[in-house]
Image (cartoon, coloured by chain):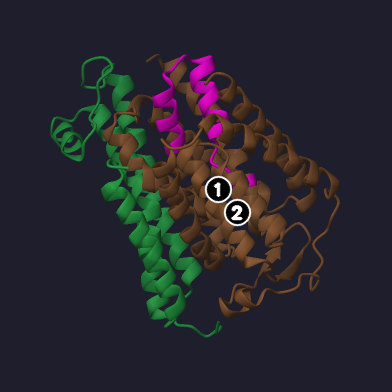
Amino acid sequence: MNDDKMFDAEVFISASLRIGVFLSAIVVAIGLIAYFFSGTTGYPAGEFPTSVAGVFSGLLQLKPAALISLGLFLLIATPVFRVGASVIIFIIERDHLYTVITLLVFGILLFSLIFGKAL
Amino acid sequence: MLLSTSIFIFLSSLVAGLIGALLGLGGGIIIIPVLTLMLGIPIHEAIGASIVSVIATSSGSAIAYVRDKITNIRIGMFLETATTVGAITGAFIASHISVKALYITFALLMFYSAATMTRKRNARYIEGQVQEDPIAKRLSMSGQYFDKALHTEIHYQVAHVIPGWLVNYTAGILSGLLGIGGGAFKVLGMDVFMRLPMKVSTATSNFMIGVTAAASAGVYFTRGDIDPVVAGPVAIGVLIGALAGTRIMVRLNSKTLRLLFIPILLLIAIQMLWKAWWM
């Protein structure tokens, strides 16, 4: 590992995590505040969106629960995004071994996200 | 849901995030009992919330640990091949093996690990004492970090890469199959087998747990296990707790971390036996 690399991989990963985490926290917080001020989730008791399409159609109607779910989506996406960002970093650093290792993890991750239901 | 219930979930999550960030765990061992036993929330929603908690602890604490280079990204990425494949294996074999027997086996392993850690609780990390594994050298895994408790730069080598990989594979199976104990097993694998400094083990475990959890989060979401009203306050509480936890962890010494880790291992073991009992 050379010290005079173009940019700091750790700082980049840390910064991308920070953006994801703060963005999701803000969206979840706004959703919770909207829920407690309006006194309703926007859905009948015990119901909430369980699909991406459901969340987005709820968002168009400004339903508080849909807003919270969007924030949770962003949170769930941060580790996936982090692995993707690491692939790019290892490519930039011309670290072929770790590019392959990270691509492998990214592939397994996408595999389980896509085929997760069937497992 | 009542505002007071929501605040109670938030405060419990704050504690879960704090402990999780200190010890490299996801906080499920606190979130699940609080939600089910104290608030009567259905177990599937509690598990969904604990998946959110794992991701929040992981991403929240990694902000500081990665920046401060306590997390070893290479070791993390390498071991993620083990944990993710393990999680998929766990999901595949779930219907073919006795989960009850597995709970009991792992509970015993946790008790044994707690005993081992108690014996070596005073062990200090001594530089140059670890015999570097040739595989670790090939994968340029050795690293260094500045220890704020010791006010010194710690250089470390990595031993027993293959056993470490296998323990992490098992940790993946554990998270895929049982949903608890994955983080603790990762820490054990890195601390006991790969002989990493305790702080590097917990920070790298923290870095990894979010990826394994994210892989299964999609399933929980479509199944309707992630109730926004429950998981929302969990997410916020855990994030704030984890951010605070990172500030505390860097100033603690490894002995204190170990002493905190031992009762948590026992707690996980007891929860596993509890679950086995009710199966």
Q: Which residues are magenta?
A: B23-51
Secondary-structure class at tag 2: helix
Q: Is residue B192 above or below residue A117?
A: below
Report the chain holding disc 1: B
| Chain shaded brown | B
Q: Marks 2 and 1: in contact by CB < 8 Å?
A: yes
Name the foreground residue: B236 vs B51: B51
Taking the image as shown, residue B266 lies to the left or right of residue B78, namely right
Q: Amino acid at mark 2?
A: Val
Q: Which residue is mark 2?
A: B167
Name the foreground residue: B119 vs A86: B119
At which x and y percent is residue B212?
A: 44, 49
Report the chain holding disc 2: B
Would residue A96 be counted in the magenta stretch?
no
Q: Amino acid at mark 1?
A: Ala
What is the crowding at mark 1: few (fewer than 14 residues within 10 Å), some, or many (at least 20)?
A: many
Taking the image as shown, residue B26 lies to the left or right of residue B130, namely left
Answer with the quarter of the image where residue B274 lies: top right
Would residue B25 be counted in the magenta stretch?
yes
What is the crowding at mark 2: few (fewer than 14 residues within 10 Å), some, or many (at least 20)?
A: many
At which x and y percent is residue B219?
A: 32, 39
| Chain shaded green | A
Secondary-structure class at tag 1: helix
Q: Quadrant of the N terminus of chain B?
A: top left
- Say which residue appears at 67% left-offset and 69% top-offset: B158
Q: Is residue B61 above or below residue B156?
A: above
Label number found at residue A18: none
Q: Is residue A36 above or below residue A72?
A: above
Q: Is residue A42 above or below residue A117?
A: above
Q: Which residue is mark 1?
A: B171
- Whether residue B238 is visible to the viewer of this picture, yes or no, is yes
